[in-house]
Structures are given as C-alpha cells and as structure tokens.
Image: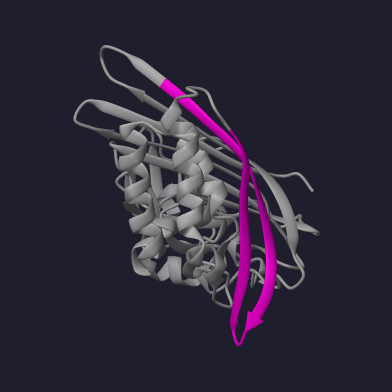
Amino acid sequence: MIVHFILSGETLESISEEINLENPIYLKEFHNTHCAREDFIYDQLIPRKKLLIPDLNKIREYNSRNDAPFKHPKLNPEILFNPENFSKIYSVSNKEVEENQLEKTSNTLSYTVSVKWVRREGIFHIFHIYKNNFSDEIGSMMADLASQSIRSLNPIEVKTNHKGEIINVGLKEETINNFAKIKEKLSDLFSDNYAEIYLNEFEFAVSNKDLFDRRMKEDVFIKTYFSSLRNSFVNGKSYLEFSIGEENIHINLQQKIEGPEYDDEITLLQSINSSEADKNFNGKYILFTKTGMVKEVEIEYFISQSGVKNSNLFTIKELS
C-alpha cells in the first residue's frame, strides 16, 4: 500500500481517478480497513491527514467487480437524433461582459430563433433557421443594421449529418439571386458611410458560399445548437470540441449525464477537459430523449487575456 497525505480540494473521486480506481467507495473501504481508528474516513477528506492507497493488484481486483457508478447504462446512453418533422421556436440571450482594472462593461443581445426540419438527403438533414425579434441593450445604429441584415437572409439553411453535427451552412438560391434588392432596401434604411462599408462586406460574404459557410459555423446559436452532443459515451463520459470568444478559441470538453433518473428529458453537463487558469467553461443541455433534439441550453464561460476578462452567459429556451 501507499501512504498519501491529502491535499486541499482532493476528494475520494479525484484521487480514485488519478490511480485508475473505478469505484471510489473502495478507496474509502481499503483505507478504513487498514488504518488506525483515529484515521477513519467518515465523510469528507481532511487535508494533511494520511490516506492509505491500495497497490496495483488490489486496484485491479476492485475494478474487476465492474460496479462503478459511471458504468450505469443510463449514464452511457446512445443519444438519438431523430429530427423529422421537428419545429420549435426558442428565445435566445447572449450576455457579454468585459472587465479590466479600470472598468467593466456589459451588453445583452436577445432574439428568437425558429428551427424547422425541412427534409432528408440520404444520411443528412436539412434545417431552416429564422432569426427575429432582436433586442440590444446598446441600441446603436450598427447593431440595428446587423439585426436587419440577418433578418433579410431568413431562412438560413443548415445541413447536418446523422448525429446533428454541422456539415454546411448556406442560403436558399432565391435569397442569393435577390440579394441586390435586399441590399438596396437596407441601404435605404441605413444610408451613412459606415453602413455602406458594412453592407459591402455583407454582400461579399453572402456572394461567397465558402466564406458564408465558415462565418455562419461560428455563429453562436448555430454552433451551440448543432454541437457534437451525441458522441459515444465511455465510462460515463463523452468528449467534444467547441469554440468560445470572438477569436473562436478551440477548447476540449468532457460531457456527463446529470443523473440516471431521467425519462422524457436528458440533461448533459459539460466542462472544460483541462485545468486552465485563463479560461473556464460550464455547459448544460436539456434534450428530448426520444428525438435527441434540444429543449434548453445554458453556457457560461470566461477567457482572460492581457489583463482583460471576457465573460459570457448564453441561453436557449424553448418557447413553443
């Protein structure tokens, strides 16, 4: 056996994971069997006290019992993706906070999104996305222009694979063909020089299918809603990649089921798969069990760079 002195913040679960012991209950059992009575573990671990750790052979014996909580079948589900005839409207809120030593600023953008399954193409699914009812705390002319521009493209067409992951984002041909009229109408509504620059860049993105695809895959709603949620679970965990912040910094996430006591809805909990002082991420998805479609999302994260901390709270809630 090994004698370990408990560090602040350590738990039976965290230590068991480090030594590859699947069920933490056996770490407590082993320690209490071999330690002096005054060193018994009753509930929480106490920093600086001794913990007796089993050797490799004993760990193998414990693991052979195959009774770890994360082995529960409902904690290792195959999450379905059956979107046929799906149609829902969601309220969306995106609160951004930027703070440094001198000041703290924030802004919240809210809008509604309609997600409608349109058709199937082999193993792929086609969705139409409609964004409407934009509300911005700042209420600037450029924010209004951006909102009007997005609305003018409705619907945006999203193509996914059989697991609901984005393959391509584009526009209907009629929208592209009529864009000259769309731009003209927007120019009439917003006629200053900054608006003209914005609309010229907007036109360039719309007319370039590859560029439009790349930019829309970075759209916070699209990349969140069509995230890689349905990757396979092993030992109570699945893994996926995500991107955060204006610079779309890629992070690796691990995903767990909140608990096995679910029926019609399943809750997924996400966290960053590494310990990094300059960033953190916590996500919560609620899916319909039978279809695997999203009901609610709440994502909260922060990034610290060059003395500036950017925080974000993003939510999606079903309306109908």
Between 44 and 40, the one lying in front of the other is 44
Question: How far across and down, in percent of the image, does residue 255 sit?
Answer: 52, 57
Question: How far across and down, in percent of the image, does residue 261 sit?
Answer: 76, 55
> What residue appears at the point 69 percent right and 62 percent down from the top-left corner?
116
Residue 80 visible to an observer of this rendering: yes
> What residue appears at the point 22 percent right and 25 percent down from the top-left corner?
307
> What residue appears at the point 35 percent right and 25 percent down from the top-left corner?
98
Q: Quadrant of the N terminus?
A: bottom left
Q: Give the range drawn in magenta.
A: 106-134
Residue lying at the far left of the rendered structure: 306
From the viewer's perspective, is residue 71 above or below residue 120? above
**Rendering quarter of residue 129:** bottom right
Residue 111 located within the stretch drawn in magenta: yes
**Rendering quarter of residue 134:** top right
Residue 294 located within the stretch drawn in magenta: no
Q: What number of labels is visible?
A: 0
Between 118 and 304, the one lying in front of the other is 118
From the viewer's perspective, is residue 200 above or below residue 63? above
Q: Main secondary structure of the magenta part?
A: strand
Residue 6 visible to an observer of this rendering: no
